[in-house]
Image (cartoon, grey):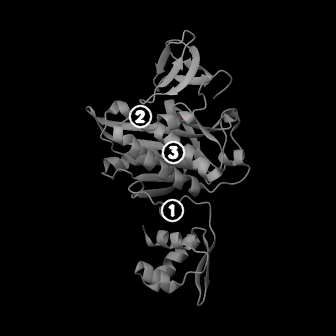
Amino acid sequence: MDLKSRILSLLRTSEEYVSGQELCDGFGVSRTAVWKAVNLLKEEGYEIEAVKNKGYKLMSYPDSIAKSEIASRLHTKWMGKELHYLDETGSTNNDVKRLAEEGSIPGTIVVADCQSSGKGRRGRAWQSPPGTSISFSILLKPDIAPDNAPMITLLMAMAVADAIRKTCGLEAQIKWPNDVVVNGKKVCGILTEMSLESDYIHYVVVGTGINVNQESIPEELKETATSLSIEKGRKIVRADVLEHTIAAFEEYYETFMKTADLSMLADEYNEILVSRDKEVKVLDPKGEFSGISRGINKKGELLVELKDHSVRNIYAGEVSVRGLYGYV
Ligand code: BTN
């Protein structure tokens, strides 16, 4: 963690003024270094009061997801130890791919305030407007069979749902396989991309977009998408959501890696599955059919019970599942 993040972390948790001396001694740096770091934070929008003989106090902070803000909050074991932030980029998934090729370590994260050509699934575009959304991608190098890698997307959906519940108190659910929904509308999309070398995984990039503080949703998406602030009726601190998502994802990922499947996590996933025990329509290119969604198995496949009580396992991919009435 750099000095700015360490100072921020301390000031955020202190009710009282923190003396310059305490900061110098604590971090083993000079007063000038502290003063410079505080000024840089001020330039980023942090309101820090400096009072003679008392020290520094954080009075207010911007809704930032920049590097110092996120680094100062992360207490993960390895996730996000290499952290990059961009005010604007094309796609954070592409940035992480580039870093992977350059030899970055697993757990490397790229966060962006906005994306100019964000990618969605199935070649669709993803909107990441500035100042209101979260876009980030994580680099992973799991030693598992390539067939098992798509399950990592489900772990991220669980992590985002967990973070939303904890930080906003909203009832977040999952629309199989990996859309996170609140009140029946999508607030988060996840795009996982993989680089294979013959039969083993070179690396995986998990990219996540969350609609946080958008006040309105583009007309063509209004029926199916929303933002956390619209659902909550107040602004949400983006860094809270991102911090909790990364922390939860590290835990889910470590649990997943113990078995390379979802045997220890499927029950928890199914508890927040929006279609659980409801009738769904499976849009299979080979032919649509309906049935009752019975949740996922340990491979992440959705089990759909047909009228004759036989069960079909649905693989994510080209197949999509809809509720009988509308998107979920
Ligand atoms: C979807 O639901 O279609 C998936 C959307 C994934 C969007 C995220 S935003 C961060 C990362 N960078 C991208 O270009 N896409 C993913």
Q: For mark 1, what is the residue?
A: 73
How much space separates mark 2 and mark 1, taking CA atoms?
A: 31 Å
Image spot of residue 282 (x, y percent): 55, 19
Amino acid on which the number 3 mark rests in the picture: Ala
Q: Are marks 3 and 1 in contact (CB under 8 Å)?
A: no
Residue reaching furthest to the bottom: 53
Inspect this view and state whether residue 120 appears: no
Q: Is residue 3 placed above or below 51 in the rendered structure?
A: above
How much space separates mark 2 and mark 3, taking CA atoms?
A: 17 Å
Q: Is residue 217 placed above or below 310 in the rendered structure?
A: below
Q: Earlier in the sequence, mark 2 or mark 1?
A: 1
Badge 1 density bin: few <14, some 14–19, many ≥20, Cα 10 Å: some
The quarter of the picture where the N terminus appears is: bottom left
Image spot of residue 81 (x, y percent): 39, 58
Q: For mark 3, what is the residue?
A: 159
Q: For mark 2, what is the residue?
A: 263
Amino acid on which the number 1 mark rests in the picture: Arg
Residue at position x 41%, y 34% in the image: 263
